[in-house]
Image: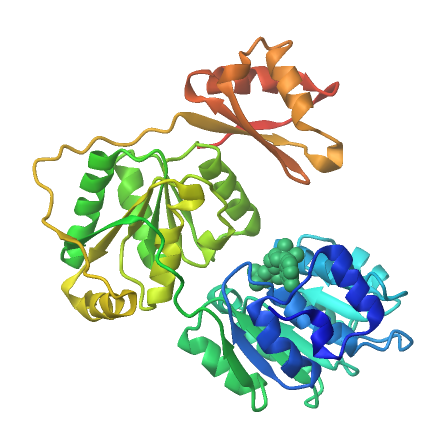
Amino acid sequence: MTSFAELNALPMEQLANLTELGYLTMTPIQEAALPLILAGKDVRAQAKTGSGKTAAFGLGLLQHIDAKQFNTQSLVLCPTRELADQVANELRRLARYMPNIKILTLCGGVPFSIQRDSLIHAAHIIVATPGRLLDHLNKETVNLDALQTLVLDEADRMLDMGFADDIDQVIDYAPTQRQTLLFSATWPDAITAISQRIQRNPMTIKINSVDELPAVEQQFYEVSRNGKINLLQKLLSREQPASCVVFCNTKKDCQAVYDALSDSHQSVLVLHGDMEQRDRDQTLIQFANGSSRVLVATDVAARGLDIKSLEMVINYELSWDPEVHVHRIGRTARAGESGLAISLCAPEEAQRANALEEMLNMKLNWQPLPTGIAIIPLEATMATVCIDGGKKAKIRPGDILGALTGDMGLDGADIGKITIQPTHAYVALKQSVARHAWKQLQQGKIKGKSVKVRLLK
Ligand code: ADP
Ligand code: MG
């Protein structure tokens, strides 16, 4: 537990600001990375989500900014718009004591022309997704000649989303004399490769390589690759989980498992990096509000998932990385509730199973294949209606609830979670009333205005 003051590198105003933010001691990643970052070294760091990576690079890059120079001195690349917004907000909080620091986000989904106008005066710090930033660089609306610090945040996820080429092209616009920082929650080989391309003598930091094992019942089944779908169906029928995530290692498997479950009328959704941001948001909302009982996902895509009581996790294939396995199964044991984690393991995955046994220092609980189970497709209790109109149209949950329970005569007990997004709102409704409510909303009004409404599958 070290305080920020012990770094002997941050100004008093920043220390006071950190105290106000409630940052009293450094997190382990900050303790390990900040001295190196402040000393101007290239750093590549692996630490899990929520470990305080943003402040680790944020405090470093802010120290190197000269606010009197009106040029772009720091660039943070992020995989998605929400993550870029989160990082920019955290940087603004960390920079509160510094007057006249301009921090700008550049992501897709916002008209290019608006961004071009806000770039007439260069920002000191740009937080961007690689694709949109590259558009600006190609059109010369952004200039990186004065760049000092380049950060790749959630690098694994950016690679998973196919941004490697864009990142390389962005870097062609940056000076070779710079500090490059790379942060990633997992460490596939591609991370080492990109680090070698873009960093100079990087210092490597890995924090918490294997977490404490969550208190989750684990079952392992040995099954051929071809037999996995059928076993998966049987296990879902036997356990009847209210909510279950099926983890796959590849997008291809995700799609195949989803297709098979969906063909047998299971209540299922799929989530992977190839999907548009909006579809991903929508899928996460539908799953979280009970409109689907099964979600088939890759590890990186599932990172946006914030669900308190996941009943079951199924590893359709063992991960190569024991840490990822621990992370997966930990999702069912939130808030002290008990969960079940089942792993399907083909003979060719034996090496991974052995590594897991060794790393976790426990005997894997192998189970015989279940027999005599009839397949009963899972059905969701809720369905989701999507309303074209959200925060920007000043729609609040109360407006929707009021419209449904007032004029439209629905029972409050039939209405579930209401999620308001910038341009859309999502309402969970009991299956039995969803169709009726959808029709009513189409004809009725919210805040005195007609709205477009869709019933999502
Ligand atoms: P990561 O990027 O590693 O997933 P974040 O940077 O988003 O994690 O930080 C996770 C949370 O921890 C944020 O809410 C942040 O405000 C908080 N946090 C970061 N550093 C500290 C600290 N030193 N003390 C207390 N809270 C912190
Ligand atoms: Mg982060």
- Residue 416 horizontal side relative to residue 265, left or right: right
In the rendered view, tell whether residue 429 sits above or below residue 252: above
Task: Find residue 392 and report its image quarter.
Answer: top right
**Residue 446, image x and y in percent?**
69, 21
Which of the pair 41/5 is nearer the observer? 5
434 relative position to 71: left or right: left
Question: In percent of the image, x 60 and y 63: which residue is there?
Answer: 52
Q: Is residue 289 left or right of residue 241?
A: right
| In the foreground, 296 or 46 | 46
Residue 297: x and y, percent?
Answer: 39, 51
Image colouring: rainbow
Picture residue at 80% right of the left edge, 67% below the top: 14
Give whichever of 241, 159 is nearer the camera: 241
The quadrant where residue 410 appears: top right
**Is residue 129 something that shows in the picture?**
no
Q: Residue at x 82, y 74 (%)?
A: 11
Would you place residue 239 above or below residue 92 in this image?
above
The image shows residue 164 at horizontal and vertical percentages of 53, 73
Q: Is residue 358 left or right of residue 63?
A: left
